[in-house]
Every structure is written in structure tokens, then in C-alpha cells.
Amino acid sequence: VISETLEGRIHKGRLLEASFGHETTALLDKTKHVQIVACGTSYHAGLVAKYWLEEVGVGCSVEVASEYRYRKVVVPEGSLLITISQSGETADTLAALRDSCSKGYIGSLTVCNVPESSLVRESDVCFMTRAGTEIGVASTKAFTTQLVALRLLMIALARRKGLTPEEEETMVNELHSLPRQVEVVLELADKIQIMAEDFSDKHNALFLGRGAFYPVAMEGALKLKEISYIHAEAYPAGELKHGPLALVDETMPVVCALPDDPLLEKVLSNLQEVRARGGELFLFSDHKVNIGLDRYQSLTLADIYPGTAPIVYSIPLQLLAYHVALLKGTDVDQPRNLAKSVTV
Ligand code: F1P
């Protein structure tokens, strides 16, 4: 079976669904609910998409494939199964897709980076991320391109919920300006390298986030774990007081992305709690944000749009992990114990 390949082409503030193909548009027309299944970094991309889809009124569940495949899931009517995978060969994700045939989905769509992979062959339709070959084991450009693909799918589903042309134009233009937004971040590379020096003697790190920036924090923590071997955990910032705060003292670096969004005040108050316990703060913030805390290190990003902010803020976190790993002398491309494709 060759899947139908859809492409997310945009032109003059519109998503061109003509490039999707009939099978895809028919599937999206029938979609009332989305179930995302993936592993590792791809799972984090799915979690970001959940926040995006819910914003436009599309229900979405996200689960790691290694758990999902063994559960007796109740599939809501009109559910589309979306698998996400860099390699397209991850055993648990593939098993989840194969089992889904008996579970009543309207169809399956994969967001994948490898055209000749099993997931692409076996899904009804596929959205190729075209990230090029991921050289390192730890997914980086696969993650950002997965997010772009998921954002485009969100726009297509939002259209079916009554997205106005003006709203669509805003979303599309945000995506269109991603290269420029990413350049803003890449200009910070030298400063991130200096920031990384404070991590090279650390054994633990905490990443905090709220809303779509919680999965961004999860991905930042995973990158640090994978390539620098520093134990890192991510928490929704509001959960801090329900346990993790006990870990915070002057030896605990706390990393947080601070976009200028409606949850900002809440996150700042969580960070205040960290400072009160002596935790060291490493922040990536929007230039409009008034941080107002006593001691922290911060790098500011300008002209980042809200819709694409989770994509853009992921990059300084990837760069931080990269520079910490370089300082620690680990192999950033081939971390110990990890495989590029987890096929068993
Ligand atoms: C999933 C994944 C990657 C991770 C590593 C092991 O792979 O967990 O996120 O970086 O390569 O596998 P995939 O399904 O996205 O190929």
C-alpha cells in the first residue's frame, strides 16, 4: 500500500489544501477527534499539537505508544489516528498503528521524516516532514518540522470549525516568518554557550513550562538527558509546589521559556518560588517580558509570534543541551545506550 502524501503548501495567507489529495481532505472532513500516538521527542511534538488543536475546538488525546498499544482504548466517534515519528520504524508506534485497524478509527495519518519507512507505507495518508537526514540520535530538526506539519494540520482542521480568513492569514503568516524568527535565536548561540558553562558541573536540572510550553520544557529536559547525561526533569510550573519544590536549592538550575502569553504572570510567580529557595534561573524570554525577579540569567528573543512560539523556543533549549554536551565531552551525535531507530 502506498500512502497518499500530503504537502502543507501555503500561498498569500492561505493553506493550499489542493496539495493534500482527496483521501486526506475526506479524512479531515470526517475528523471529530484526534488520537496522537508517538515515542520520545515525537511524543512531545504531539503534546504541543494537543494544545493547538484544543484552542480551535478539536478534541485530542496524546499517548506514548509503549503504553497506548497495551490499553483497551475507547475510541471516540470520528477519531483520526495520527502517528508521529522521525524514523517511521519505531516498534511501539508501528504496533499501535497496526492494532488501530480493529479499534474503529476513521483512518490513520503519519507525520514522518523517512519516505520509505514502514509507518509511511502502512498509514492511510502521510505528511512528510522533509527535515533531511537526522545525523544525531537525538531528534532536533525532526522535532521542529513535526511541529510545523502539526500546525498546518491544525489550520486545516480549524477551517472545518469555522476559522475566518483573517485568522487563517495570521496563522499562516506566523509560519511563513519562521525562518526569520529562528535566525533571531541562532544569533544567541554564543550567549547560550556561555550559559552552558554553568551546567557542566551540575548533576540535575529542572525545566518548567505552562500550556504548550510544558511539552517544550519536556523536550528541553530530554535533550539535556540524552546528550549530556545530566538528570533533567520537566514539570508543569503549577505542579512545582506539589513535590518538585523540595528538590530546589542553590545547586539546582531551573530552565524556563517565558513567552509573552496569558500564562506569564502565573509562571513568574512559580519562578519566584524557585528564587525564594535559592534555585538558579536560566530563562529564555520575550523582550517585552518584565521578569522582576532578584537573580537570574536571561536571554531575550524579539518578534516571536504566539502561534509559532513553541517551535521557536525549542531551539535555544536544544542549543543549551548541545553546548553543555560539548563542554562535558560527550558524543552529541551518538549518545551512549541510545539507538537512532528503536525497532524492538
Ligand atoms: C523516537 C525516539 C526519538 C529519540 C531517539 C529514540 O523515534 O524516542 O525521539 O530521539 O532517536 O527514538 P521516532 O519514532 O521519532 O523515530
Image (cartoon, grey):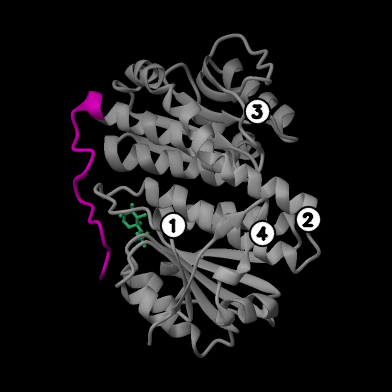
Spatial CA distance of label 4 from label 1 is: 20 Å
Q: Gap in Å between the C-alphas at discs 2 and 3?
A: 37 Å
Q: Nearer the viewer, mark 4 or mark 3?
A: 4
Q: Is residue 293 left or right of residue 226?
A: right
User: Residue 270, labelled with which disc?
Assistant: 3
First along the sequence among labels 2 and 3 = 2
Which of labels 2 and 1 is toward the front?
2
Whether label 2 touches label 3, CB < 8 Å: no
On the image, which quarter does residue 227 sit in? Answer: top left
Q: Earlier in the sequence, mark 4 or mark 3?
A: 4
Mark 3 or 1, which is nearer the eye? 1
Q: Is residue 133 left or right of residue 263?
A: left
- Check disc 4 and report its element: helix, strand or loop: helix
Does the CB distance between marks 3 and 1 fall below 8 Å? no
**Mark 1 neighbour density, 10 Å: few (under 14) some (14–19) many (20 or more):** many
Bounds of the magenta segment? 326-344
For mark 4, what is the residue? 155
Mark 2 — residue? 165
Tag 4: amino acid = Ile
Q: How many marks?
A: 4
Q: Which mark is residue 42?
A: 1
Res. 57 image quadrant: bottom right
Residue 40 position, x and y percent, is 40, 55
